[in-house]
Amino acid sequence: MFQLLISRYGSRLRDFWYGAQKKAKKTARDRGLQGWNDVAVWRDFKPIYISEDIWPRYLEHVMSERFTRHSQSSAGNRNRLIHGLVTTHTGGSIPFVAHVKRMVRLI
């Protein structure tokens, strides 16, 4: 049952935590703090809708070696060059036919 919930609502949960992280970063940046993109700096800017005991646990997760390694690997995969072009899921914001023609030219 838990796996079903994760598979169905996992992206929403990711979006929720990404939004909370983004809000904390923005607050730190708006206050003019140096290194506002660093987890240690925005640790004190917990969004009001997250409880006091959960926020530090989330930050520990974000700072963990496993999370960092996975994040860097994913970023590298998103920015990988294939046939001289950066790969994207949609092929960019061009019509599908134009994308196919461009890919045929590269082959």
Image: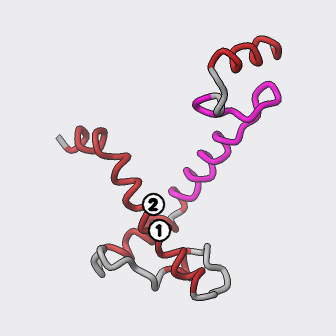
Q: Is residue 88 above or below residue 58?
A: above
Q: Position of residue 59 (x, y in %)?
A: 44, 71
Q: In terms of image quadrants, where is residue 31?
A: bottom right
Specify whether residue 52 is painted magenta. no
Q: Dot 2, how many residues are within 10 Å of its Cα: few (below 14), some (14-19), or many (20+)?
A: few
The residue type indicated by label 1 comes to Gln
| Nearer to the camera, 36 or 32 | 32
Q: Is residue 16 above or below residue 26?
A: above
Picture disc at residue 18:
2
Q: Position of residue 26 (x, y in %)?
A: 54, 75
Specify whether residue 89 is painted magenta. yes
Q: Is residue 75 above or below residue 60?
A: above
Segment tinted magenta in the rendering = 67-90
Mark 2 vs 1: CB contact within 8 A: yes
Residue positioned 30% across, 81% down in the render: 52
- What quarter of the picture does the N terminus occupy? top left
Extreme-front residue of the structure: 95
How many tags in the picture? Answer: 2
What element does badge 1 sit on? helix
| Nearer to the camera, 86 or 61 | 86
- What quarter of the picture does the C terminus occupy? top right
| Left or right: 25 in relation to 99 | left
Q: Position of residue 103 (x, y in %)?
A: 75, 17
Picture disc at residue 42:
none
Extreme-left residue of the structure: 1
Q: Position of residue 35 (x, y in %)?
A: 66, 80
| Residue located beneath label 1 in the image | 21
What element does badge 2 sit on? helix
| Nearer to the camera, 19 or 58 | 19
Residue positioned 65% across, 32% down in the render: 92
| Left or right: 13 in relation to 68 | left
